[in-house]
Image (cartoon, rainbow, N blue to C red):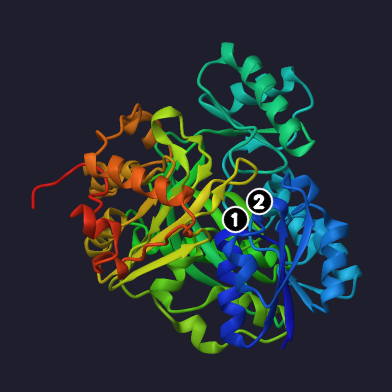
Amino acid sequence: MFRKILIANRGEIAVRILRACREMGIATVAVYSEADEQAPHVHLADEAYPIGPAPATESYLNIPKLIEVARKSGAEAVHPGYGFLAENPAFARAVQEAGLTFIGPPPEAMALMGDKAQARQRMAAAGVPVVPGVSQVASDEDLARAAERIGYPVLLKAAAGGGGKGMRVVWKPKDIKDAADAARREAASAFGDDRLIVEKYVPKAHHVEVQVLADAHGRVLALYERECSVQRRYQKIIEETPSPVLAPETRQALLQAAVQAARAVGYTNAGTVEFILDPETQHFYFLEMNTRLQVEHPITEMVLDVDLVQWQIRVAAGEPLPAWMAERTPRGHAIEARVYAEDPAQDFFPTSGPLLAVAEPQGPGIRVDSGVIAGMEITPYYDPLLAKIIAHGEDREQARQRLIAALRQTVYLGLPTNVPFLLDVLRHPDFVAGRVHTRWVEEVVLPWEPPPPEPWAVAAAAWALQRKHAPAQPVSISDRASTGQNSPWQRLRLWYPGGRSEPS
């Protein structure tokens, strides 16, 4: 087993990996930009090294600097987390060439699955269902002909990259050229590659993904599915497991297809095979493979009682996956809500500024993966994810109610967050019934108006702002401390209702 691991990331995922390493008795090395000098992951690690200015291109994406720190610190392995360089084959190769272990898949598998055009072709050859489409279009004329042959509506997608960038839905032939031009510009800007593929668009589709874990000894496991259909701008905000719309026979076919996909590219370590599903016909199609740990991995951990990060590390160290893991079945239901510093009423525009006070929930079945503390500055340089609130219950309704209660106890004072929006989604009749799809937020929930500000919140923010400029240190309020006589919530005789009030 490794003695020391460098974590090439920041925020809540860096804290998550640190916790896994600590439980395994592995020393940790953190890296940080100038903007993150006071971030929690820096102070929780055994060692921490500065790697450059705030812009990610000069710090967290600086491969030579990361390798330099890994060597200097004596780290034996590098965990990339997610985002930044996690799916960059060049980084994985640089780590290996430096004599270190990359905690992730082989660079060759990463490169293949990172190219959507090549991935489609490989999956089709392996017998994995793929959406009807064309992987290579040389010109606008080829694109138009392919779209006509497939049948409208169609989806244009960047051949490289992901995260919803370079994607456009086209409903009519007259719109395809403008959509293609816009998608190419966005793809070139984001990935340096303007190639597009065109696929049949499945309206009201569900986004269902399968967690896979593979070792270097030939064992590939499918650790069940996650429903990820609640999205904004093609990015997930609420995930759950199991999916409320999968028939049992569809589930088994989906898991088998994920295993086929992983085997087809010689995959090892943790990854996620993503599919789109027509809930009416139960037909599913390969979408892409994320060759890394997913943001939403905690819900799989909650229902299976498996630490995926620790098994990433064990697999990278050469350990085989145990036989019992193949026999484990999910228990209960888990739902995760991503808390972002963003304004849902303003097209989810990211927000920045100081966190004046923080209160994160506790309770039965509640888990919080967080990377922030009170007094910390949320900057515009990185993804605005503050924390993930996860609830586990014996069934879906108990998990949903627990998550609502947890979010009503969640406070990030100082800047707008999406907490009230998440609560409205979780309470919506469509979500309760499992009727959401990938375009549901845009078609049903938006435009969205926030609830009226509570008078107590104005007073609490003023109090916290006053404390920020006073000689005393900024406060961090835990759920347990909220009942103490020194708590500002106790002095105000108010607690955070978490959005729109409900009958008691």
**Image disc number at residue 124:** 2
Q: Residue at x 29, y 57 (%)?
A: 488
Residue 23 against residue 349 in the figure, above or below? below
- Compare residues 312 and 23 and report the one nearer the observer: 23
Quadrant of the image occupied by residue 440 = top left
**Quick check: 106 left or right of 197?**
right
Q: Residue at x 31, y 55 (%)?
A: 407
Q: Residue furthest top?
A: 174
Q: Which quarter of the rendering shows the N terminus?
A: bottom right
- Compare residues 295 and 39 and report the one nearer the observer: 39
Residue at mark 1: 128
Residue 155, image x, y percentages: 57, 31
Determine whether the residue tagged by mark 1 lies in a helix, strand or loop: loop
Residue 378, image x, y percentages: 55, 47
What amino acid does circle 2 point to?
Answer: Ala
**Quick check: 384 left or right of 485?**
right
**Residue 215 appears in the rendering:** no
